[in-house]
Image (cartoon, grey):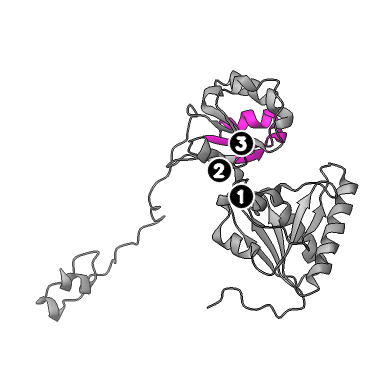
Amino acid sequence: MNPHPANTARFGRLIGISLGPGDPELVTRRGWAALQSDARWAYPVKKAEESSYALDIVRRGGLSIPADAVELVFPMTRDAVALAKAWARAATQVVALLAEGRDLAFLVEGDASTYSTFRHLARTVRELAPEVEVDTIPGVSSFAAAAAVADLALAEEDETMAVIPAAYGTTVIDHLLDEFDTLVLMKVKPLLDEVLDLLERRGLLATSCFVEKVGAPAQRVVHDLASLRGAQVNYLSLLLVQNPKRARGELRRGCRKRAAQVEPQATAQAPSPDTGGAAAHPGESPAATALS
């Protein structure tokens, strides 16, 4: 049975294709199938006619870029007004394309559900056209791939982990180091030296790892974090921080006990002909006695 029957609605589907963090071999089979379907491609750029990292992933995977692929501009700015205009413009453009009845495949770096432009785009599109069907194809996140190339475990057995943007600052990071066994700090470029100072004070430089542009030809894995002080790093970079000395609370294991036990029946049971005239033992039913 086809899991995606022919779309008879007025709008095409909006498909978020997760491409993984940079290595085209990490794109899932479902993602490749969507890329090679008849869906029109859309891809994000920071400026008009600028190169796209998402397009570069599929190009290195051996696919040609369709002539009708459409760029959507999402500027790198914290200006709320400029961002709102950009989102509205992109959503309007997507709705117009979907109204042609053809599916639109939006190319997403990493995983489409994790710190992704796609979820915001899908939400904005649905505000304009609630009937649009959204299909999200999951993929490999940057931090999962980073842990693999760094030969580290993100979490084992009962360990805990958290993933946060480093922009929350060193005060928050310092607090979370005591709450989680592993911290993934995304987009560390602006605060790298401050975070390195914190990790040095906490004695965690040796149990941390820096990964830049994971999966791409320019991938870099650095275990000697002290060598990064004052260095220029790429925007697509993260830190994996492990705190093996963290004090953990007691774990609750197994099933919870019942809050109250069933009270034994107070009234004596009548003799049962099936037990040779013997009464049931207190706390047992006659049937249980018969089976004992």
Given residues 157 and 24, the one toward you in this image is 24
Question: What residue would you read off at disc 2?
Answer: 145
Amino acid marked by disc 2: Ala
Give the label, 3 or 1, closer to the camera.
3
Is residue 4 shown above or below 73?
A: below
Residue type at the position of mark 3: Gln
Q: Are marks 2 and 1 in contact (CB under 8 Å)?
A: yes
For residue 237, above or below residue 119: above
Q: Say what secondary structure mark 1 lies in.
A: loop
Residue with the mark numbered 3: 219
- Please rate how many residues cluster around mark 1, counting C-alpha atoms within 10 Å: few if below 14, some from 14 to 19, many from 20: many
| Number of numbered discs | 3
Residue at (80%, 64%) from the top-left corner? 94
Magenta stretch: residue 283 in it?
no
Choose between 207 and 226: the one closer to the eye: 226
* Residue nearest the observer in this picture, 81 or 2: 2
Q: Can you tell which of label 3 and label 2 is closer to the viewer?
A: 3
Q: Quadrant of residue 208?
A: top right
Circles 3 and 1 in contact, beta carbons < 8 Å:
no
Q: Residue at x 16, y 78 (%)?
A: 272
Q: Which residue is mark 1?
A: 20
Q: Is residue 170 visible?
A: yes
User: Could you classify mark 3 by the number of other residues whose Cα lies within 10 Å: few (under 14), some (14-19), or many (20 or more)?
Assistant: some
Q: Residue at x 74, y 30 (%)?
A: 190
Compare marks 3 and 2 and give the one earlier in the sequence: 2
Measure how far apart labels 2 and 1 are at the Cα level: 8 Å
**Label 3 vs label 2: CA separation?**
11 Å
State left or right for residue 120 relative to residue 228: right
Q: Which residues are magenta?
A: 163-188
- What element does badge 3 sit on? loop
Q: Is residue 48 above or below residue 241?
A: below
x%, y% of residue 151? 48, 36
